[in-house]
Amino acid sequence: MAKKHLGALVLAAAAAGAAAAGISYFVKYKSFHKELDEEFHDFEDDGEDGDEEPAERTYVSISPDKAGEKADEAVSACAEAAGDAADTAADAAEDAADAAADMAENAADAVEEAADDILKAAEDAAEKATTTIEEATD
């Protein structure tokens, strides 16, 4: 019998919880809707009075003399920058050529030294061979 009453008690508690949740949701929705409606009405009339005149539009005039001067200044600045870039490139090319010449000279010196060493070794080998042949024939 206790199990029967326990099930009814759980069912009643669930129904009461669902009812409380529904009421809470309804109250929150109603207050949110009321605040939203008030904010909407606060901004409803902004900028629509019609009594205000539109802002006056102004234009900036550009004289041909000033435009020509600015264009000339820009052209001279570009020409100066191009000249600087050309000088820098020429200096870099000269440095690269000097470095290549130095490397070629170092390589030539190394080859010459190696050739001298090989020649000396060949002369030594020929002399030893001659000595060995002379000793063998005696």
Image: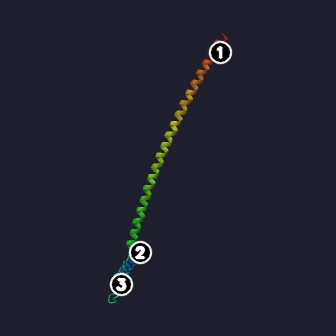
Residue 126 drawn at (x, y percent): 62, 20
Give the amino acid type for the residue marked by disc 3 in the picture. Asp
In the picture, which quadrant includes the C terminus?
A: top right
> What type is the residue that disc 1 sits on?
Ile
Residue 55 at least partly seen: no
Residues tagged 2 and 1 counted as in contact (Cβ below 8 A) = no
Quadrant where the N terminus sits is bottom left
Vertical order, 24 against 86 (above or below): below
Color style of the picture: rainbow
Q: CA distance from mark 3 to mark 1?
A: 124 Å
Between marks 2 and 1, how big is the CA–CA gap? Answer: 131 Å
Q: Nearer the viewer, mark 2 or mark 3?
A: 2
Q: Which mark is residue 5?
A: 2
Vertical comparison of 120 with 88: above or below: above
* Residue 97 visible in image: yes
**Along the horizontal axis of the image, is 118 left or right of 32?**
right
Locate residue 9 relative to residue 129 in the image: left or right.
left
Outermost residue to the top: 138
User: Residue flagged by tag 2: what amino acid is it?
Assistant: His
Please state which of residues 48 and 110 is positioned toward the viewer in this rendering: 48
Between circles 3 and 1, the one closer to the viewer is 3
Q: Residue furthest right?
A: 137
Which residue is at 42% across, 76% downward? 8
Q: Which residue is mark 1?
A: 133
Q: Earlier in the sequence, mark 2 or mark 3?
A: 2
